[in-house]
Image (cartoon, grey):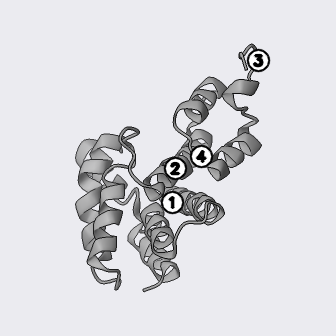
């Protein structure tokens, strides 16, 4: 299966939940854009794109099981769900393992290992900031502390009017 076929499969898996579908498609679009702008190697780009599509695969289960879609519960429940979901896609076991790892860590902002992980965090944040109405203070702090990619920072700056730390009012250069 290619990424487009996995997209169709994930949309079907979402059983008409338009919010979930819209969310993962937006995260996918940002992840694809950032990854391509950052020049990821083809396999890493594919891992990133598929991880973006399935990163919230556990949300329906978490809502049913826990009454909400808490990030830590999503991570715990999502990694094994992603592995099962992807097993018939033709992706290599190494790719499925990495995607499952990313799904199982996409709310963990420490010990980020790999550009695919970094970009998934940034893409998900770009969408969550809009969907959850994050404050400008939160957005600026996240830009300065979490965002690392040139493309991710540029998107955040374009969307929210954020500035690099050195250009913020009162910053010492």
Q: Which residue is mark 2?
A: 124
**Crowding near the residue tagged with mark 2, few <14, some 14–19, many ≥20 C-alpha atoms within 10 Å:** many
- Disc 2 is placed on an element classified as helix
Task: Check the image and name the residue furthest to the front.
Answer: 173
- 3D distance between C-alphas at marks 2 and 4: 5 Å
Q: Which residue is mark 1?
A: 24
Q: Which residue is mark 3?
A: 169
Question: Where residue 58 sits: x, y (%)?
Answer: 32, 56
Task: Examine the image and state in which quarter residue 114 appears.
Answer: bottom left
- Disc 4 is placed on an element classified as helix
Left or right, 156 with reference to 91: right
Please tell me how many numbered marks the rendered image carries.
4
Which circle marks residue 126 in the picture? 4
Question: Which one is earlier in the sequence, the residue at label 1 or at label 2?
Answer: 1
Question: Which one is earlier in the sequence, the residue at label 2 or at label 3?
Answer: 2
The vertical placement of 1 against 74, above or below, is below
Question: What residue is shown at x 40% (from left), y 58% (from top)?
Answer: 55
**Crowding near the residue tagged with mark 1, few <14, some 14–19, many ≥20 C-alpha atoms within 10 Å:** many
Are the two marked residues, 2 and 4, in contact with CB atoms closer than 8 angstroms? Answer: yes
> Which quarter of the rendered picture does the N terminus lie within?
bottom left
Question: What residue is shown at x 66% (from left), y 44% (from top)?
Answer: 153
- 3D distance between C-alphas at marks 1 and 4: 12 Å
């Amino acid at each position: 299966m290619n990424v487009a076929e996995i997209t169709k499969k994930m949309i079907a898996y979402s059983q008409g939940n338009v919010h979930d579908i819209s969310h993962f498609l937006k995260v996918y679009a940002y992840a694809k854009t950032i990854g391509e702008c950052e020049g990821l190697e083809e396999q890493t780009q594919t891992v990133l794109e598929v991880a973006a599509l399935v990163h919230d695969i556990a949300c329906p289960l978490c809502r049913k099981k826990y009454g909400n879609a808490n990030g830590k519960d999503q991570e715990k429940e999502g990694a094994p769900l992603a592995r099962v979901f992807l097993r018939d896609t033709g992706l290599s076991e190494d790719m499925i393992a990495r995607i499952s790892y990313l799904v199982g860590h996409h709310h963990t902002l420490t010990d980020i290992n790999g550009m695919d992980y970094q970009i998934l965090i940034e893409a998900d944040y770009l969408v969550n900031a809009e969907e959850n109405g994050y404050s400008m203070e939160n957005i600026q702090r996240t830009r300065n502390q979490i965002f690392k990619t040139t493309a991710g920072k540029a998107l955040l700056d374009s969307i929210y009017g954020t500035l690099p730390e050195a250009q913020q009012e009162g910053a010492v250069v």
